[in-house]
Image: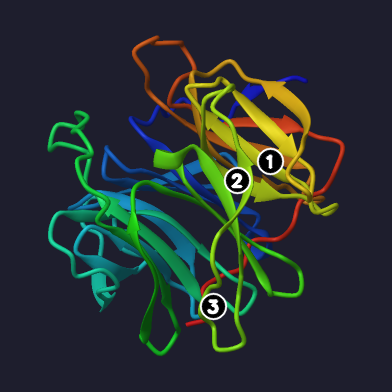
Amino acid sequence: MQWTALTEHRAQLGEGPFWDAPTQALYWVDIAGKQVLRLIGQNVQIWQMPEHVSAFIPCNNGDALVTLSSGVYRLDLDSPGLEPKLTLFCVADPQPGNRPNEARCDARGRLWLGTMQNNIGEQGEDLPIVRRSGGLFRVDPDQRVTPLLLNLGIPNTLLWSDDGTKLLFGDSLDSALNQYFIRTDGSLDDAQVFYKSDQHGGPDGSAMDAEGYIWNARWDGSCLLRLTPEGAVDRKIDLPISRPTSCVFGGADLKTLYITSAKSPQNHPLDGAVLSMRVDVAGKLCTRFAG
């Protein structure tokens, strides 16, 4: 498999890739670098955020959501990169000392946001995780916030079954991806282990392909694992980066895989890059926020 570094940009902690099919644009973030980025064609736009940011998701009404430490904000995409126009949308997690991590929209365009104890210093340095203070929250377009899970360590991966009855969600502190049945009232049933192994690094973000297989980025594992719908390893895809963080399918035919990554002590030349690779199966579309 042949890899290409998408741009010259190198993130401290690249995350949250989102492919917007209507505009053929790739969105992603640098959590530690406090940046949100958008690539359209060969043009990269960067907005500098005032706080750590974990997700950058376009909205149906033309702006975008950004998940910052102090809340979920709307970003005016016409505002300049060094003077971004931000409007507070809601505060999903009021817990002091927490920051956002994983965030994606379900098929109905509702934002699901996982939070955790902040583990990033002001200079981007790592801080120890000493408490499970994170949670999983659903944010509706009417600004209503519904808590779903509490006492989380490092929330990662948010994927749903086609019929909307099952959620795949992980906690990297447990090295596990779990499956939850979504009750008719929207609450979650008890977790069922979907995949748990630290043989190839720890579980980070994931994407789902059109066959229902999961492509999971393995932090410190220099690879992706393609997992069957039953949670078995189908294949291992080696990568030239130390810490892949997440992935998304994009391109006109959804057969280009984009992988975000983070810097690492190994200092590999491509650490922090966004990689792209052509694959043999199409992925599923990302959903914009419905607001």
Mark number displayed over residue 215: 1
Q: Tell me where residue 252 appears, x and y as whole percent.
A: 78, 51
Per the image, the residue denoted by label 3 is 60
Could you tell me if residue 83 is visible in this image?
yes
- Neighbor class of circle 2 (other Cα within 10 Å; few <14, some 14-19, many 20+) is many
Q: Earlier in the sequence, mark 2 or mark 3?
A: 3
Quadrant containing the N terminus in the rendered view? top right
Residue appearing at x 14%, y 54% in the figure: 97
Q: Which residue is mark 2?
A: 206
Q: Please, is residue 168 above or below residue 58 in the view?
A: above
| Viewer-side residue, 198 vs 210 | 198
Q: Residue at x 21, y 38 (%)?
A: 120
- Left or right of 75 on screen, residue 126: left
How far is disc 1 from disc 3 in space, using C-alphas? 27 Å
**Toward the viewer: 129 or 103?**
129
1 and 2 marks in contact (CB < 8 Å)? yes
Residue 7 visible within the image: no
